[in-house]
Amino acid sequence: MTANPLLATTARWLGLLLVFAATAVGAAYPSAQAVLETDKTIVGEPLRYPDQGPAKVSAVIVEIPPGATTGWHRHGAPMFAYLLSGALEIEYADGRRVAVKAGDALMEAMTVAHIGANLGAEPARVLTVFMLGGDAEKVLVAPAPETPPALPGATRAADLVDLAVFDPRLKLDIRYATADNFMAVAMYPAARAWLQRPAAEALRRAHDRLRAQGYGLIVLDAYRPWQVTRTMWDRFPKDRAYLADPLQGSRHNRGAAVDVSLYDANTGAAVAMPSRYDDFSERASPDYAGGAPAERAARDRLRAAMEAEGFTVYPNEWWHFDYRDWQSYPVSNQPLTRP
């Protein structure tokens, strides 16, 4: 059997270290605290050192600022990681998540793509040690997962309808088809709004109620492909209180949620609300007590009409309404194709 050059080199260095320690302190070798002992990566891959020379060890300290991520990636060689400070949440393409803090150590996944997110208030500093051989790459960019979760009980047949056709009185202002959104880039190929048929019928009834009061509905978003939710989650980890977890899928991904506001039926002008759309602050709460009285009255008028027809307002967003039984629909990644 041919000797592994990396293992041989490591053994020689360990031997020299032990000789040095014994010479320096005699028989009283310092006590040691085990950090990690394993023959597998964190996702269960058996460790196998590169058998192509020359062998090389590379140690790098990586710093991830608060609110930042590593991006999706994998490794071309075994990598030992030790968190020096801060904390990270690591998500793997197989659906698991692991929280690590200062003092934690692991052998990172190699073939399974993963992403690290710093959800804390201080930088996360990670000592990474790569056991390389030949031309092995330390880090390889990997695509984000492309398959939405299959959730038990979500078996209802989808019946998405185009709201612009279903109720032509609706005004469409689909922000994610433009760069005028918190992502600052167009996420949809076209300004389209789809909704499951029962929800669309309820929305039309709510619209009837508002038209009788002199108002109309502006649709800001409806069905959202799962991949868009995945991208939002990965890019803005600090704003996750306002974002849907892609491992569970959002109500938008099911076509059972709609974002709406009001317009004046006489003038066609948008009605002022306590906050702008996609505002990640307390002003976006449906129970926010600040702002102008007329703005709060308009928000409450919208909520009353929607709730009367079976919708429920989302706790952090006055514009977001979920239709009843949204859990029964599967999470979808069907693209919003151009008309």
Image (cartoon, rainbow, N blue to C red):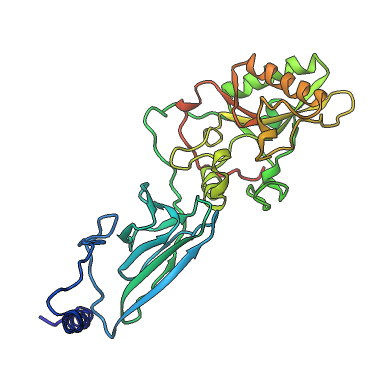
User: What residue appears at the point 74 percent right and 19 percent down from the top-left corner?
Assistant: 301
Task: Tell me if residue 80 comes above or below residue 173 in the rendering.
Answer: below
**Quadrant where the image shows the C terminus:** top right
Image quadrant assignment for residue 12: bottom left
Residue 270, position in %: x, y?
A: 82, 32
**Quadrant where the image shows the N terminus:** bottom left
Residue 98, position in %: x, y?
A: 36, 49
User: What residue appears at the point 37 percent right and 75 percent down from the top-left corner?
Assistant: 59
- Is there any visible trace of residue 162 in the rendered image? no
Task: Tell me if residue 41 comes above or below residue 140 in the rendering.
Answer: above
Left or right: 169 in relation to 114: right
Left or right: 264 in relation to 67: right
Left or right: 156 in relation to 185: left
- In the rendered image, the residue lying farthest to the right is 267
Task: Tell me if residue 41 comes above or below residue 133 in the rendering.
Answer: above
Image quadrant assignment for residue 290: top right
Residue 142, position in %: x, y?
A: 44, 62
Residue 322, position in %: x, y?
A: 57, 26
Left or right: 136 in relation to 73: left
